[in-house]
Image (cartoon, coloured by chain):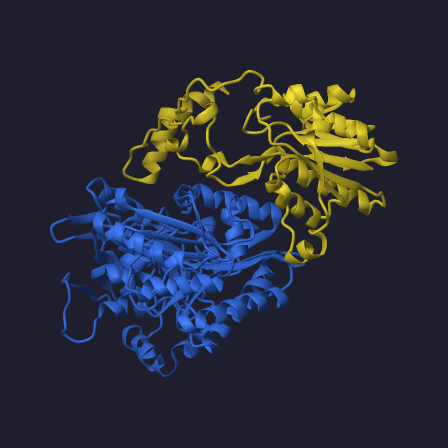
Amino acid sequence: MNILTCFKIVSDLDLMSESDWVVEDHFRINTSFVKNMINPYDESALEITLLYKEQAEKLGSAVNLSALTIGSKQLDAYLKTLYALRFDKAVRIENQHDLRFSPDAISTVIANYVKVIKKPEVIILGRQSGVGDNAKTPLLVAEHLGWPCISQAVKIEPASEGLLKVSSMADDGLVIETIRPPCVLSIGNAPNSYLRIPTLKDKVNYGKKEIEVLEIENYLNQAVLEQPSEGHNITGLKPINHKRQGVVIEGSTPAEKAQNLYHNYLQERLKQL
Amino acid sequence: MSTTSKTQIVETLISILGKERVITDEEVLKESSVDRFRRFEEIHGYFTQPLPVAVVYLRNKNEVAAVLKFANEHNINLVARTGDSATEGGLETAVENSIVADGSEMNKIIKIDPYNMQATCECGTSLQDLEDELREQGYTTGHSPQSKPLAQMGGLVATRSIGQFSTLYGGIEDMVVGLEAVFPTGEITKIKDVPRRAAGPDIRHVIIGNEGALCYITEVTVKIFKYRPENNYLLGYTLNNMKTGFEILREVMAEGYKPSIARLYDVEDGASHFSHFAEDKCVLILMAEGPKPLADATGKAMEKIVAKYVECEKVDPRLIQVWFDNLNWDVSKVAEERTEIMETKNISNTTEISATWDRIYDIYKTCVERIRNEMPDMTLVGGHSSHSYLNGTNMYFVYNYNVVDCNPKQEITKYHLPIKKIIVEETIKAGGSMCHHHGVGKHRTRWIQEEYGSSYYILETLKKAFDPKGIMNKGTIFPGE
């Protein structure tokens, strides 16, 4: 089975203090001072992909993994890491345009790439990223390709005869479906949130393969590339108040505090259960 | 070894402290049997050390004295603890029926004395709280270890800790002016706060760095400094070689400049922090602070020194500032680290050493090469120098590895200790010190005699004099039986 996992590199916005959030030229926030990281949902997607490969190979099925990202040369370090983790192919579509808020453009690039290489039967993506936060890209990729999409996927396992067993979160619990590819899987809050780390030896032995670099103009209309980000502009910044109110439970002993907690805060609520 | 039963120990402790302050809950005892050194085992639910008989929360020096006296009279091992952020096994309960004596509730800031530029606080005072309080008044302790949000003053002094601004302000030993400590007999001792004295040996150093193996620190007085962050002169550079970096650090120090920060990262360690601007590069960070004329003069002079080294490229100081603002460990980072270790089975550990300028590069190079070649499953081997002196600097080795093909209980013997052995043995062989600022703990004691050489006589005599029954944190600093 051929799997394509797409990932995005984002700035680690948790590292920015309130004073770092300044609107600079071209109405952008400068995040270049903070470290980059793999978008957390995409990190889950990559780890789930590797877990799937391990399981399938134990059952004797061959799995070919490709990884795709869109951006500048700076992202090659991440693709080398994926080679070291035994991805078979690492592809970067070179792009210098601002596509942060353009899920339609990004999904078009991915879908057109897939149409050209005609290879992957399964495309795996994180459901959303902190920048943009629209959760549209996986759905739009599926739409462009005319493939089904399972959203909020959290686990992928091999099933018999080339089928996939996909677990996904729904409002009322976990849904387990067995599906026949091709399909797009949008990874949600999966239990595997961290990507494994390659050893130094694997970096030397596998991490130096050539990264395939493609031009975005081959997959997206020039006119779309030059459009501003779907008309979105920053008009102002306002910090979100994350403060929560707290109450200190009084009492001279832990037992007294527990009594106060029970009588004043829990008793009534427990009755309502 | 104590012949007193667990029940008798607990009953006596309750009679001294009251029931509420003597904790015997098994989960608390398990967590209190280890520190960060055994976090891989602990995260996976394994507790391999003997569980303490109780954790007791102490409120004042008299309670400390009573508990120590009881432990001493009945040969019961006692582990002193405050912020619980130790990394070298110093808080492990190495023998059965130990008492963990927690001073974290002795957390009063007793006096901030701006006129005499000193502050006095109890041992359980969080460094972060003290620092916040001082900064509100325009002062700072000048002490900023990565553990600042977690560590407390007693533990910081007991482990001879050091902070990120040490090249200017010094290590904790340069900051402490006075102390109060309780010895195993119950003797409460107070060393008065004076600028200096020549009245015999400096007995502060019997207490500073004792790691709970000689006495229990109850109160600390430290120097304070004017806090003027607006004058900070921050410099960042990328460069190709650690050797060049060490040369620059040496020149800055030898010329007599006093940067508050002087850090040099190798490519591998730097990649974890600076990959967004320094791919495949070493990183050098210098900062001057203090009164504006002094900070400016120091900053400009350091710029001039670095300018002579053509491989150094200056970077925007904001890149360094944002990184620095996120360097310290807090509770949420510790929690996040636990999840990451659990999921990836990858763990990061460190060993810190020091040596003179003529030896440090060779130690660095030899250790990194040996670990890379001899140890399996390594995912990162590198390090940084973060504290420089007139005659040398430290090296903080950072090593990450995937724990594979073994039980979590074997992580230490399969990976951590063999790596530490390489670093410690190479350092001692080259004439450096095996411990720069984390303390000896329980896992470097096997080399303590080599570390001290003929001067071990002095160290050993301290133990014999102040803790003849060996009840204070058995197995720490001094090898166990």
- The quadrant of the image that shows the N terminus of chain A is top right
| Residue situated furthest right in the rendering | A161
The single residue placed furthest to the left in the displayed view is: B115
Can I make out residue B361 in this image? yes
Residue A103: % across, % down: 63, 22
Q: Image check: B135 left or right of A191?
A: left
Location of residue A135 with respect to B439 vertically, above or below: above
Residue A170 appears in the rendering: no
Quarter where residue B95 is shown? bottom left
Taking the spot 81% from the left edge, 37% from the top edge, the residue there is: A2
Residue furthest to the bottom in view is B454
- Against A195, is B195 above or below? below
Q: Chain A is drawn in which colour?
A: yellow
User: Residue pushed farthest top?
Assistant: A231
Residue A232 horizontal side relative to residue B114, left or right? right
Residue shown at 44% from the left, 61% from the top: B245
Position of B284 relative to B470 (above/below):
above
Viewer-nearest residue: B168 or B42: B168
The x, y position of residue A224, in whole percent, is 65, 19
Q: Which residue is drawn at 42% across and 45% down?
A: B320
Residue B83 at x, y = what percent?
Answer: 36, 52
- The hue used for chain B is blue
Residue B60 percent coordinates (x, y): 23, 53
Residue at horizontal 39 percent and vertical 56 percent from the top? B307
